[in-house]
Amino acid sequence: MIDRAASLLRDGRLVAFPTETVYGLGADATDEAAVARLFEVKGRPRFNPLISHLPSVEAALAHGDFRDTALRLAEAFWPGPLTLVVRRAEGCPIAWLTSAGLDTVALRVPGLPSARALLAAAGRPIAAPSANRSGRVSPTTAAHVDAEFGEDVALVLDGGPTAVGLESTVVDVSGERAVLLRPGAVTSEMLVPITGPLARPAASAPIASPGMLESHYAPAAPVRLDATELRPGEAYLGFGPIPASLGPGREYLANLSPGGDLVEAASNLFAMLRSLDRPGVAVIAVAPIPETGIGAAIADRLRRAAAPRGSSNRVPPTA
Ligand code: TXA
Ligand code: MG
């Protein structure tokens, strides 16, 4: 199956595959036409650059300008759920469309061995945004991908539910100071010993991470945060013990982690948002969640899921 997927990718087709974070929708990052089709199928604005995935640290280092902090981060966290934005290496084959015309590229070496096997077999950088229509909830199972794309994708590799459940941490190390563009499983607590204090994205920055668009990761139903009581028509997404007044007998109820474990909550977040997002549910009310460790990334995604729809204002992520 991996060989077939790799050969489809080399032919310019779109292949969805699992990583340890979420499922990605892959295309040959060096093939302008394949990448154009990827933007079209996702409904993604072309000013939003894509991440290029490589099978090894060595392969990734060849595509960008890595020194100092960038190199130390690569060595510490790759393979893994971290994306580094660096200056494009001279002669870098990644298509300009992939990086939305920027002179930087976003690179990632995924932690999931089957993803690295696919990338090695493809033999070229693979652009892979999360395999969902732009602005919607990222997929953590192959069934989620099928539901979004159907026939538009040549092949969906099924690796079961993804382990992390949130997209990779994105750090821009192309300038003087490291900038946290998107929080994820590699937390700021883990980054800071290497990067020093992380800068926040400048409000005036010309580059938007789609993850920085205010409304993103959104289910169809509106989302209400820090809910400690339920209103008529609401479904409840809990964290930790569910208050007795809310719990038993409710039809639409899910719990991110009954034991209050943030890593478990992250892995359940997108699938549970999807499962509660159904006809008859007017609003998804979400319990308060602590913002420590990966909780910062959960809170970041939930704020965007709850943001007014159609909003394209950029808001900086939680540092
Ligand atoms: O976990 C993940 O990162 C998944 C899996 C499939 O690897 N991919 C993913 O891709 O989440 P996507 O396209 O949904 O998010 C890519 C993020 C966006 O926020 C994008 O703006 C940012 O990376 N990005 C890509 N290239 C960039 C660049 N040159 N400068 C700044 N941000 C960049
Ligand atoms: Mg995405």
Image (cartoon, helix red, strand yellow):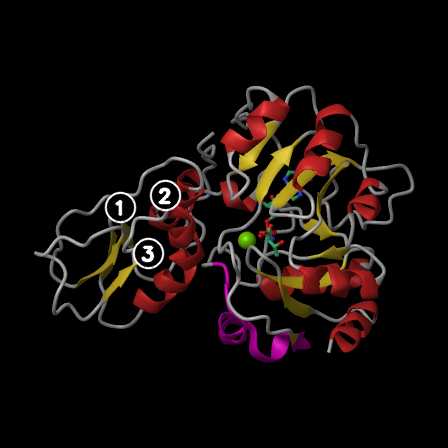
CA separation in Å, label 2 and label 1: 8 Å
**Would you say residue 141 sits in the magenta stretch?**
yes
> From what the image shows, is residue 284 above or below residue 302?
below
Q: Which residue is mark 1?
A: 225
Please tell me whether mark 3 sits on a helix, a strand or a loop. Answer: loop
Give percent across and percent down for residue 189.
Answer: 50, 30
Amino acid type assigned to the residue bearing label 1 in the image? Leu
Residue 87: percent from the left, percent from the top? Answer: 78, 33
Q: Which one is in front, 141 or 312?
A: 141
Quadrant for residue 233, please give it.
bottom left
Q: Reading the chain from its start, which is encountered first: label 2 or label 1?
A: 1
Q: Earlier in the sequence, mark 2 or mark 3?
A: 3
The residue nearer to you, when weighing 239 against 94, is 239
Q: Residue at x 68, y 33 (%)?
A: 73
Tell me, yes or no, whether the two marked residues, 2 and 1, touch with CB atoms within 8 Å: yes
**In the rendered structure, which amino acid carries the disc numbered 3?**
Leu
Query: What residue would you read off at disc 2?
Result: 303
